[in-house]
């Protein structure tokens, strides 16, 4: 790495009070979805004092910043997400969410604070940079496809004369040891799809099921059949997870309803398995219902693609993180995470990687600590300097000869 790792981490630690302050301000005022005006204003305020060319989105409240080095060269993208979750916070933290029903329960406030901390580190080192750092601050990661909107608006053409040659993102996890960086080549996170099945029966009196067409046992049979379908069709080395998360039927105890409704998700790690499992869910539901002389309506909504790390970039993350936090705290992730990420859209277009940064709070056991998306999740702010330094180090590694 062209900049000594110890110097970069020391600079991030010296700046930690500002990074923590920004994180807490964001945490108090979470916003959900694609339109985050208050969050965007805070980000713009932080960027105003830096030598960064700023543009905002038209279809979302995204922010794009371009930090130019002293010499010409390629462009390297660093990404953070801005949005929160529809979760009511119950942590009791002094800087807990002030917005009822909204919480930064996935750590996006930490991501944003670390990226802006990295922007400050990089601004101080502009004379050593040949090229541009592209700061991608996106809303709508939590199911709203915010990265896709930014790409459609021309994110990768922000510096027309210098194409984006690489991309990097960090994600914190409260149930992983604090300060430990993990990454792996290939699939890092899964594709996620949504499906719905409505079983069409015929209502009637609960005392005379033979005179009706009861969709409730058919729906139950579909649930069980889907579990068998996964274990018997998906290879263990190309896995799939099918979850039935919602089953609704009927309104009282003595009426057979005319329909039953199921919905859930499909999570896979390859395009081939993704297509196969979607088709299989439809086929199983159709034929189980047909065996009982009923029909179904099937709806499939495609979610995020597989988040696939470029192997060479993943190797660089391991090496650079090893210099920053020590080789014993820079590890190959044992397995992909079956959650999904819309940074996947960027990685379809640009070689890059997403890495995980542990942020389990001091004194807590990672195995039992409240995890991401929990109303009780707490993240260790002590991990912020390592994250800011790693963001900056990845850009410097690509842009400093």
Image (tube, grey):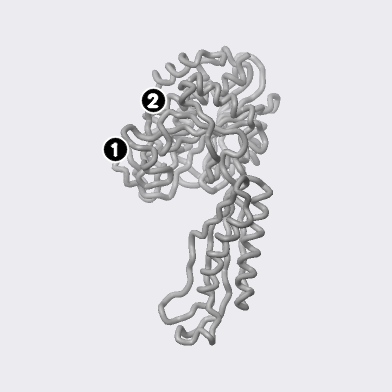
Between discs 1 and 2, the one toward the N terminus: 2
Q: Position of residue 213 (x, y in %)?
A: 55, 80
Horizontally, is 112 left or right of 167 in the view?
left
Image location (x, y in percent) of residue 90 = 32, 46
Q: Is residue 220 above or below residue 135?
A: below
Q: CA distance from mark 1 to mark 2?
A: 17 Å
SS class, disc 1 = loop
Residue 18: mark in rendering = 2
Report if residue 391 is visible in the image. yes
Position above or below: 363 against 398: below
Residue marked by disc 1: 94
Q: Let me know if residue 25 appears in the view.
A: no
* Residue at (32% x, 37% y) in the render: 95
- The residue nearer to you, when weighing 330 against 41, is 330
Left or right, residue 368 beside residue 32: left
* Label 2 secondary element: helix
Q: Look at the picture and state if 385 lies above or below 63.
A: above
Image coordinates for residue 360, horizontal then vertical, percent:
38, 35
Mark 1 crowd level (few <14, some 14–19, many ≥20, 10 Å Cα): few
């Amino acid at each position: 790495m062209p900049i000594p790792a110890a110097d970069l981490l020391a600079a991030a630690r010296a700046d930690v009070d500002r990074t923590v302050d920004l994180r807490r301000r964001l945490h108090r005022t979470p916003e959900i979805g694609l339109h985050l005006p208050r969050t965007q204003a805070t980000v713009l305020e932080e960027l105003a004092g830096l030598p960064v060319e700023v543009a905002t989105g038209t279809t979302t409240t995204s922010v794009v910043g371009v930090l130019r080095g002293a010499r010409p060269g390629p462009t390297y993208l660093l990404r953070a997400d801005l949005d929160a979750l529809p979760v009511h916070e119950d942590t009791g933290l002094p800087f807990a969410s002030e917005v009822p029903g909204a919480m930064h329960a996935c750590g996006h406030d930490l991501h944003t604070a670390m990226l802006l901390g990295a922007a400050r580190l990089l601004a101080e080192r502009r004379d050593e940079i040949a090229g541009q750092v592209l700061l991608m601050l996106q809303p709508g990661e939590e199911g709203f496809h915010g990265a896709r909107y930014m790409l459609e608006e021309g994110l990768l053409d922000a510096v027309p004369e210098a194409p984006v040659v690489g991309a990097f993102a960090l994600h914190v996890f409260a149930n992983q040891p604090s300060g430990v960086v993990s990454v792996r080549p290939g699939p890092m996170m899964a594709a996620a799809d949504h499906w719905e099945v409505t079983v069409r029966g015929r209502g009637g009196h609960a005392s005379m099921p033979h005179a009706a067409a009861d969709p409730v046992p058919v729906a139950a049979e579909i649930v069980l059949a889907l579990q068998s379908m996964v274990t018997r069709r998906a290879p263990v080395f190309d896995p799939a997870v099918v979850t039935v998360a919602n089953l609704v039927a009927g309104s009282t105890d003595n009426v057979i309803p005319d329909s039953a409704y199921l919905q859930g998700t499909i999570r896979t790690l390859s395009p081939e398995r993704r297509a196969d499992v979607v088709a299989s869910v439809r086929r199983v539901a159709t034929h189980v219902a047909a065996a009982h002389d009923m029909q179904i309506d099937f709806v499939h909504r495609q979610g995020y693609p597989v988040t696939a790390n470029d192997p060479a970039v993943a190797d660089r993350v391991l090496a650079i993180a090893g210099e920053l936090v020590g080789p014993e705290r820079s590890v190959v992730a044992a397995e992909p995470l079956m959650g999904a990420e819309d940074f996947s859209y960027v990685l379809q277009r640009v070689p890059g990687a997403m890495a995980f940064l542990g942020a389990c709070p001091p004194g807590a056991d990672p195995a039992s600590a409240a995890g991401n998306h929990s109303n009780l999740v707490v993240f260790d702010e002590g991990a912020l300097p390592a994250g800011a330094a790693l963001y900056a180090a990845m850009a410097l590694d690509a842009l400093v000869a």
